[in-house]
Image (cartoon, rainbow, N blue to C red):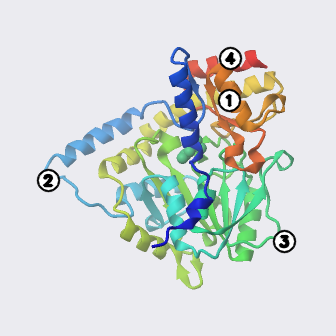
Amino acid sequence: MNINKNYLNLEDSYLFSTIAKKVSEFTNNHPEKKLIKMGIGDVTLPLAPVVVEAIKKAADEMGVQATFKGYGPEQGYGFLREAIQKYYSSKNVNLAADEIFISDGAKSDLGNILDLFDKDNTILIPDPVYPVYVDTNTMDGRKIIFADANEANGFLPMPDENINCDVIYICSPNNPTGAVYSKDALKKWVDYALKNDAIIIYDAAYECFIKSKDLPSSIYQIEGAKDCAIEFCSFSKTAGFTGTRCGYTVVPKTLIRQGASLNKFWLRRQTTKFNGVPYIVQRAAEAVFSTEGQKQIKENLMYYSENARIISETMDKKSIFYTGGKHSPYIWLKCPNNMKSWEFFDYLLNTAAVVGTPGAGFGKNGEGFFRLTSFGNRENTIEAMERFSNLF
Ligand code: MLT
């Protein structure tokens, strides 16, 4: 037999696993130190009360013969797809319910979607960006080219007419930089994709942090996008589902390539390789869209946004360059004293017991940068920023 040798081209360990290992070594060696984690973007606030109620109610239904559910539809229950459809209508985006597919999270779908694409496609990925895009394409052996994101372009690279590609990744608000594309800028990407017959993989996992109606929170707010884009979203950051697991992917029916419907391909893929998200979790996700649910999750999002403001204020006071924080839970800062990303990671961990994410882990252009998350609790965020301020 032959192994998939493409795996030999990956880093030994996934970025956040490497960090977790380093942190565990630190806590074993220094059990007396209070560690503050601002590394992986994991939420800390509990689920909203209406979500918990929905989980309890659905669990009760599962224990009663008349309401018990076995296998559900692989693409998700109608009640959740319709709730998402309404959510999109509120953003002036009209979708059919069968253009929406429920999954166990955006990360899985971002990897799984590649089943639909030939291995000979050329992939355009911004650098720096969420490492899953590069790793999943590397596993399949696809050719990857990078769009440089840097201080000069505000970490928002624009299309280059001289470059040909088949699949384009866009994450806005961006992980890790927090930069957000304007409608005009996104329109340029849509036009470029249409011209090149390319597909845009649009990661909208952080759309709920956008605070201005002038900024696009879905690529389908841009004319032409339904003919070239697949959108991925998640309840992880929106409603604290990192441990509950639920997300959704939108594949418009107008997305046709070489005469084939990608919506049909995805349905075929999901019905064959996936058995759906638990009923209980889908009821929990549905509750997020109720009036009370929207109110409760907004309170949590505002809490994280205030943390982001506290972190940004510290960077301002110390005159440290950064992006993000305003429409994003991430603050992307330039490492003080020209330190390299991993050097700064070790320095902050060892001197302040604060964990962040080294920018170099998101791509070569991330070298010299560092990401802090605002998903911690208030007390820890304030304490971490006090410790940070005392160092510089
Ligand atoms: C991150 O920290 O970049 C995210 O939490 C990772 C993820 O969403 O999988």
Answer with mark 4 or mark 2, whichever residue precedes in sequence. Answer: 2
Quarter holding the C terminus is top right
**How far apart are the alpha carbons under marks 4 and 3?**
47 Å
Answer with mark 1 or mark 3, whichever residue precedes in sequence. Answer: 3
Q: Which residue is labeled 2 in the image?
A: 66
Q: Which disc is residue 162 wearing?
A: 3
Q: At which x and y percent is residue 338? A: 84, 33
Count residues near mark 4 (Cα–Cα under 10 Å), then give few for <14, some for 14-19, many for 20+.
some
Q: Which residue is labeled 4 in the image?
A: 387
Asked which secondary structure carries label 2, the reply is loop
Q: Can you say whether 262 is above or below 237 in the image? A: below
Q: At which x and y percent is residue 151? A: 83, 44
The kind of residue tagged 3 is Asn
Label total for image: 4
Q: At which x and y percent is residue 340? A: 77, 36
Asked which secondary structure carries label 1, the reply is helix
Asked which secondary structure carries label 4, the reply is helix
Looking at the image, the residue that sits furthest to the front is 1
**How far apart are the alpha carbons under marks 2 and 1?**
57 Å
Q: Which residue is labeled 1 in the image?
A: 346
Asked which secondary structure carries label 3, the reply is loop
Q: Which of 49 and 355 is in front in this view?
A: 355
The residue at the point 37 percent across, 39 percent down is 51
Count residues near mark 2 (Cα–Cα under 10 Å), then give few for <14, some for 14-19, many for 20+.
few
Residue 144 in the figure: left or right of residue 207: right
